[in-house]
Amino acid sequence: MVQDLKGNIRVYCRIRPIFNDEVKTVIDHIGDDGSLVVVDPLKPQKDKRKIFQFNHVFGPTATQFDVFRETQPLIRSVMDGYNVCIFAYGQTGSGKTHTMCGPACGLANELGINYLAINDLFQLSDERKDIIEYRIQVQMVEIYNEQVRDLLAEDLSAYTNIQSFDFLTTNKLEIRSCASDGGLVLPDATMCPVKSTTDVINLMKLGEGNHAVSSTAINNHSSHSHSVLTIHVHGEDVSGSIVQSCLHLVDLAGSERVDKSEVTDDGLKEAQYINKSLSCLGDVIAALAQKNSHIPYKNSKLTLLLQNTLGGNAKTLMFAHVSPEGDSFGETMSTLKFAQRVSTVEFGAARANKETAEVLELKAQIENLKKALANKQ
Ligand code: ADP
Ligand code: MG
């Protein structure tokens, strides 16, 4: 299970099923131990096979529930005060949105991690209601061309007839870079209190709708932006002890390299922003692995936004998505190499953001003493 593994970053690989019109597969072997062997269909010789090792590999027959079951302990730890980030990485069409959300209008057994996680958090909150009172709030944003846009802003519904994407970029959010004090990273993004899974599902539909507004303006927009759903948890137990944490659920932009000759100037700009933010994400995790004193969170909006769930006392889970089809071999290799680089990381022991009633009481006393001192001077 996820929490029993050493270190605070896990990398799971998920391989989507092969579609009818796809003939050759790059998958040679999937081991129960997290090993994965891939082969270039154009060079099928044994000595050309590539071997990777992850915390777990989900093959094409794995169900949404199989994936959720392996992730559930990590998700539940949010309720104990751990900051958690789950992100889906991979080329467009590899299954990122399927894992995080499930298919649009999907059946109940196809629901993705977002829905199952939220449902589970409410269930846990209910189980613990006699000893701890939780308050759960949600934010939903996207990062497009290094700009953060609120997907839950009420007035966005007025934009349904939008012709030009420029309109939407007026809704730019600032990220606070020093949120280690427990403050909000995105203080100006709409924060919606939620009381049930249905509340969250309705908000997610609104958010996805707002995401979709822009896809009419720019082809396949959702593959070109990072979408971040954040669940904020605040709990207070009977002794006055506070638990405060957040869970980021991130569906990243497609990681594919773009052929410069095939895109417009806008497309090239998009691709450059995506490359930049994804490579910054890799750099941040590599810097954490090497225990560098400087972690380059500030090099991209994505890493700045996720900073409190990458490194430090947080727990991070990356899903590396790959397509099994032969033509994707190059992209599959680059995803697996990125994921392998990330999976060598072992962060320090995770620590919950929990302040005991005693600590809070002592802090209050210090404040009172400071005031008394100031009054005397
Ligand atoms: P991405 O978000 O990476 O662009 P999608 O999640 O949209 O990719 O997946 C592309 C297509 O493959 C969709 O039609 C999706 O329903 C299907 N798909 C992806 N993963 C799976 C899976 N594990 N099982 C069944 N269908 C899948
Ligand atoms: Mg997608």
Image: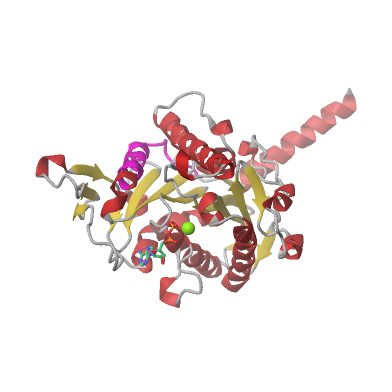
Compared across the picture, whether 5 is left or right of 147 comes to left
Give the color scheme: rainbow, by chain, secondary structure or one colour. secondary structure
Q: Is residue 293 visible?
A: yes
Residue at 33% over, 68% down: 63
Classify 192 as above or below 175.
below
Occupied quadrant, residue 361: top right
Give how far across and how far down residue 260 sits, in percent: 47, 39
Give how far across and how far down residue 275 sits, in percent: 48, 38
Q: Name the residue furthest left.
A: 46
Give how far across and how far down residue 256 sits, in percent: 42, 46
Give how far across and how far down residue 156 sits, in percent: 73, 60
Residue 373 in the magenta stretch? The answer is no
Quarter of the figure with the N terminus: bottom left
Residue at 64% over, 43% down: 147
Compared across the picture, whether 370 is left or right of 279 comes to right
Q: Is residue 30 visible?
A: no
Please count the marks in the image: 0
Quarter of the figure with the C terminus: top right
Residue at 50% over, 62% down: 114
Residue at 56% over, 42% down: 302
Q: Main secondary structure of the magenta part?
A: helix
Occupied quadrant, residue 153: bottom right
Q: Camera-side residue: 47 or 190?
A: 47
Q: Camera-side residue: 163 or 316?
A: 163
Q: Camera-side residue: 279 or 203?
A: 279
Q: Camera-side residue: 370 or 19?
A: 19
Q: Name the residue furthest front.
A: 261
- The magenta region covers 332-351
Classify 264 as above or below 64.
above
Residue 344 in the magenta stretch? The answer is yes
